[in-house]
Image (cartoon, grey):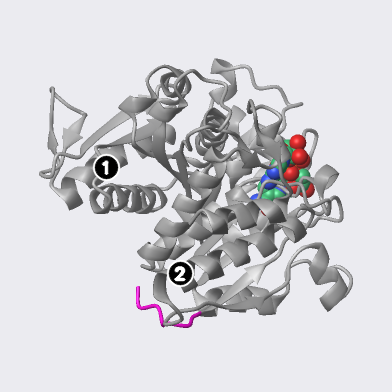
Amino acid sequence: LNVPDCPIIPFIEGDGIGVDITPPMKRVVDAAVEKAYGGKRSISWMEVYAGEKSLGVYGENIWLPEETMQAVKDYVISIKGPLTTPVGGGIRSLNVTLRQELDLYVCLRPVQYFNGVPSPVKHPEKTDMVIFRENTEDIYAGIEWAAGTAEVKKVVDFLSDMGVRKKIRFPESSAIGIKPVSVDGSKRLIRKAIQYAIDNGRKSLTIVHKGNIMKFTEGGFKSWGYDLAKEEFGAVEIDGGPWCKLENGLIIKDCIADAFLQEILLHPEDHDVVATLNLNGDYVSDALAAQVGGIGIAPGANLSDTIAMFEATHGTAPKIAGKDIANPSSLILSAEMMLRHMGWTEAADLVLKGVGKAIESKRVTYDFSSQMEGATQVSCSQFGEEIVANM
Ligand code: NAD
């Protein structure tokens, strides 16, 4: 990436705890950049609006203004806080809209453990994975019809004509959802995951799927992944296949989604980079986040071939919003991913070090302090200062 020394980075503050966690995120990033490059590099933050804040600026019902979409496209790299999903009125989730309209087909979720973070498992330090979740297809494409509608009747009639209803139970009272999984959509996601694994010297890529039941969609995803590894990365089959290996030693393997949820609890050290479809990816990434300390510390990014939008993976946490008590780590670690994506590795390393040491010092936000022996509770903004002091 060709990033100028003083790039403009649009940010969406976000709703709910967005007002609490965004200022410490900017504070930490600015301090890390200053410390790493001594004034030779800096970020010009540009606020753009979405969600509830946008209603106040742009007027009623403008949840996601065109100017915001344009800024995210033009400046290529951006960061956002959580957004409230508007209820009723036929408005789609703002996050889904952003992903679909900007074709942000990769949801990238690294899962790593910071020493001292409370965890429900005995050896959380064994978990170090990076999830590539397909973001635009699957059952999340939003193609579904309510029970009793004319559309459902048409589909039921069509399937009756094809003889399908003789073989399976499929009453007219069904609601119907469609699960599109394309060859192109699957391959572009898996291509990005393999390239990431190569670039970052990771040991394996696990394709997680439910192909034993959904042979053409989930099973297709698995086989297209193996095809791609062989066609584009020169992988050769091992142990009689379908597992295969690249020349640099990277192993491409697969695992059925339900077994994988056991695997991450029992043998997390056996898995490294993971590629999966939208629904499996949603479950797997939250389960893994819980394993290493919960969504308060889970960063993420949504990527297309050109655009990168970094975001905390949690929601707006309305009950604790505006109280300066939320854990800002997830957004700060999303910013750390952003700095790495920009090639500003030294600043990214400082952020990582600051977060790790701040947690070890046990001066942490309420979600951690309540479960850590001998810990002192600090506010959201104070925790940002702890990170800066520990860089
Ligand atoms: P949530 O993630 O907001 O909250 C779940 C639980 O986690 C709550 O107990 C909350 O207090 C806690 N929590 C979340 N972030 C925290 C933090 N940084 N520090 C400490 N505790 C934290 O999920 P929800 O309640 O289901 O959703 C609330 C709203 O957020 C909804 O409108 C939902 O649609 C939206 N949402 C947005 C995004 C996004 O913008 N990416 C993601 C998920 C949900």
Label 1 C-beta lies within 8 Å of the nearest ligand 1 atom:
no
Amino acid carrying label 2: it is Lys
The Cα–Cα distance between marks 2 and 1, rounded to whole angstroms, is 29 Å
Of marks 2 and 1, which one's residue comes earlier in the chain? Answer: 2
Q: Is residue 20 above or below residue 32?
A: above
The residue closer to the viewer here, 227 or 380, is 380
Q: Which residue is mark 2?
A: 35
Residue 331 spot, x, y in % from top left: 60, 54
**Is 224 left or right of 312, judged from the image as shown?**
left
Residue 98 spot, x, y in % from top left: 62, 62
In percent of the image, x 57 and y 73: which residue is there? 72
Give the quadrant of residue 119: top right
Q: Which residue is mark 1?
A: 202
Q: Is residue 35 above or below residue 18?
A: below
In percent of the image, x 56 and y 41: which residue is there? 361
Amino acid carrying label 1: it is Arg
The residue closer to the viewer here, 221 or 169, is 221
In percent of the image, x 46 and y 20: which residue is there? 265
**Is 223 left or right of 340, judged from the image as shown?**
left
Q: Secondary structure at mark 1?
A: loop
The residue closer to the viewer here, 302 or 220, is 302
Look at the image and give the residue range highlighted in magenta: 1-7
Residue 92 shows in this picture: no
**Is 163 left or right of 84, judged from the image as shown?**
left
Residue 190 spot, x, y in % from top left: 34, 47
Residue 242 shows in this picture: yes
Quick one: label 1, few (<14), some, or many (20+) residues within 10 Å?
A: some
Mark count: 2
Residue 76 in magenta stretch: no
